[in-house]
């Protein structure tokens, strides 16, 4: 339900101008922030949130990382399997405090 409300808000703000990519990016960012805020386990290792929590955004993953990057961020165990397996081609990285680092 929260994701639907976020999407509706984004569509209203964007004016439905056909900027599908912008809407998709904003939805992925806001959803990743929400996952991060809901995640109650230790975030220091930089876990992939979309691998362990409900994530319904096709072709995107949500990952916690550090800014600047730390060696733990480059360990495959702490990265999103869907991204490495080619099932997703976009990602949102957030810091432990849930601020967006990058979207790609």
Image: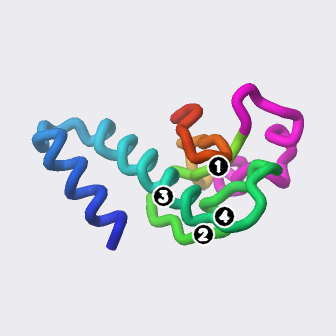
Which circle's residue, 3 or 2, is located before the other in the chain? 3
- Is 81 magenta? The answer is yes
Name the residue nearer the viewer: 24 or 49. Answer: 49
Above or below residue 45? Residue 104 is above
- Residue 34, numbered label: 3
Mark 2 secondary-structure assignment: loop
Q: CA distance from mark 3 to mark 2?
A: 11 Å
Tell me whether the residue at label 3 lies in contact with that at label 2, contact meaning CB atoms closer than 8 angstroms.
no
- Above-or-below relation of 40 to 47: below
Q: Which mark is residue 43?
A: none
Assess disc 3: are there few (<14), some (14-19) or many (≥20) residues with their C-alpha within 10 Å of its C-alpha. Answer: some
Query: Which residue position holds label 4?
Result: 51
Which quarter shows the N terminus? bottom left
The residue located at (39%, 41%) in the rendering is: 25
Highlighted range, magenta: 66-86
Q: Which mark is residue 63?
A: 1
- Residue under numbered circle 2: 53
Mark 3 to mark 1 CA distance (whole Å): 12 Å
Foreground disc of the pair 3, 2: 3
Q: Position of residue 59 (x, y in %)?
A: 50, 52
Is label 4 in contact with label 1 (beta carbons under 8 Å)?
no
Q: CA distance from mark 4 to mark 1?
A: 9 Å
Q: Nearer the viewer, mark 4 or mark 3?
A: 3
Dot in front, 4 or 2: 2
Element type at mark 1: strand
Q: Nearer the viewer, mark 3 or mark 1?
A: 3
* SS of the residue under disc 4: helix
The location of residue 9, given as percent across then percent down, is: 21, 53
Sequence-wise, which precedes: disc 4 or disc 3? 3
Q: Residue at x 19, y 49 (%)?
A: 11
Label located before the other in sequence (4 or 1): 4
Label pair 4/2, CB-CB below 8 angstroms = no
């Amino acid at each position: 339900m929260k994701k639907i409300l976020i999407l509706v808000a984004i569509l209203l703000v964007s004016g439905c101008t056909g900027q599908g990519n912008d809407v998709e990016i904003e939805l992925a960012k806001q959803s990743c922030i929400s996952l991060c805020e809901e995640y109650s386990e230790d975030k220091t290792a930089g876990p992939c949130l979309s691998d362990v929590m409900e994530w319904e955004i096709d072709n995107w993953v949500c990952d916690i990382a550090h800014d600047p990057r730390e060696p733990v961020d480059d360990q495959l165990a702490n990265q999103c399997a869907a991204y490495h397996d080619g099932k997703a081609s976009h990602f949102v990285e957030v810091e432990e405090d849930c601020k967006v680092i990058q979207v790609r």
